Amino acid sequence: MSEIVEKAELFASKLLKNDLDSRFLYHNLRHTQRVVKSTKELLNFYDLTEEEQEKLLLTAWLHDTGYVAGRLNHEEASCKTASDFLKENGYKAADIEEVCRLIMATKRHYEPQTLSEQIIRDADSSHFAKKSYWETTDFLREELKELDVADYSPKEWRDENIRMFRNEHRFYTDYAKENWEEGKARNLKQLVKEKKNEKDIAKKEALKAKYKQESPDRSVQTLYRVTLKNHLKLSDIADTKANILLSVNAIIISLVLANLLTKLDNPSNTYLIYPTFILILFSVASMILSVLATRPNVTSGKFTKEDVEQKRVNLLFFGNFHKMKLEKYEWALQELVKDKEYVYSSLTKDLYYLGLVLNKKYKILRITYNIFMLGMIISVLAFGIAFRFFGPERLTF
């Protein structure tokens, strides 16, 4: 990719992302990126010069920048924007004129005269053959409504698309005819099939509207997903810390039992009794607290129909349903997903109670680490004092 094309990509992306009216649901950065991708696919097939490829990629990136100024005469506005940008970057006047000519070739009803014009027109309308056609056509319909251009009913929009497929649009390049025509025919077939079944269309639109209304926003989903993931990660960290303390103290007690206790029955080693007792006491205390930090709470595992109807039970936590029969849990879960507020409430409860569990774990762990640290210090001091003042050889430091 040449430097000027990279600059055009940054320029167009920034302009369409920051300055374009949000009502342009179809003619936006995503559409431009799709046109660029289709242009590259066509260029990989045709043996054009580097200069011709560069101009086509510049056209693909800049051909819809004029929408920033409005919908009417956007091709001319795009030419003006492209010319200003290219002049600022030292592009040749003749090449700028060629880019503008290619931008104007994207105008509706224009018949392309050259291969470059055919490529950019096919790239601009490649969505007719894509699986994503159904998404893009819905965005275009909503865009026209938002801009007060036209308000099509689902039936009217379907008929308009069938007319466009049959009477107005066609691919020009041999590559598009060979590789994209089949996808276009498949989408047209689906449109015709839907036209024959008006009831299915109405049902589809109703379900679609219901889904849009009831499905949680992506940002809300991300918030809950990330927060729950962080809570679980913190819980794993706490369990790991507790396991480390359990292992360390188990090793300490094993060493004490194996090496020190066997020597305490000797009268000459009685001075080791208190330090050993202190070490074992603190180690046992640390182990008990570590177990308390990780010990799970036992829950009833049952709920009633009234609990579900009044939204008192969190069906997302296994501890509330592990003793229920599958049929009752399936019914309860179906009731949950019908109510978006109930879903949010259940997720919020999960977060809240996980937070309480984490708070308890980390409080106990802090106390455990303090006891462990204090026990090690006191034990070492006790052994030192015992050796210094009561040891058989009265060791001096």
Image (spheres, rainbow, N blue to C red):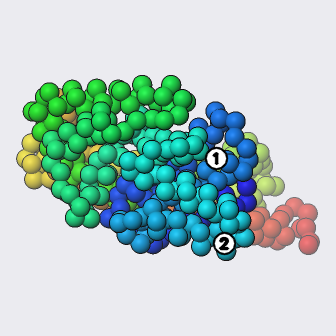
Q: Position of residue 142 (x, y in %)?
A: 26, 55
Assign a secondary structure to mark 2: helix
Distance Cα–Cα, label 2 vs label 1: 71 Å
- Who is closer to the viewer here, 141 or 121? 121
Q: Quadrant of residue 114?
A: top right
Q: Residues within 10 Å of mark 1 (few under 14, many from 20)?
A: few
Report the amino acid beneath label 2: Lys
Kindly identify the residue that appears in the image at 61 percent across and 52 percent down. Answer: 57
Q: Which residue is mark 1?
A: 247
Position of 354 compared to 284: left or right?
left
Residue 33 vertical position relative to residue 204 in the rendered view, above or below: below
Q: Around disc 2, counting alpha carbons within 10 Å, would you say few (fewer than 14), some (14 to 19), or many (20 or more)? A: few
To which residue does mark 2 refer?
Answer: 87
Q: Is residue 64 found left or right of 167 in the rendered image?
A: right
Q: Amino acid at mark 1?
A: Ser
User: Picture coordinates of residue 328 (x, y %)?
Assistant: 15, 33
Q: Which circle marks residue 165 in the picture?
A: none
Would residue 325 appear left or right of 348 to someone viewing this image? left
Q: What residue sits 63% from the left and 40% below the top?
A: 43
**Left or right, residue 20 beside residue 397:** left
The spot of residue 327 in percent (x, y) is 17, 29
Eye-nearest disc, 2 or 1: 2
Asked whether residue 335 is in view, the answer is no
Count of numbered circles in the view: 2
Q: Is residue 23 positioned above or below 211 on the image?
A: below
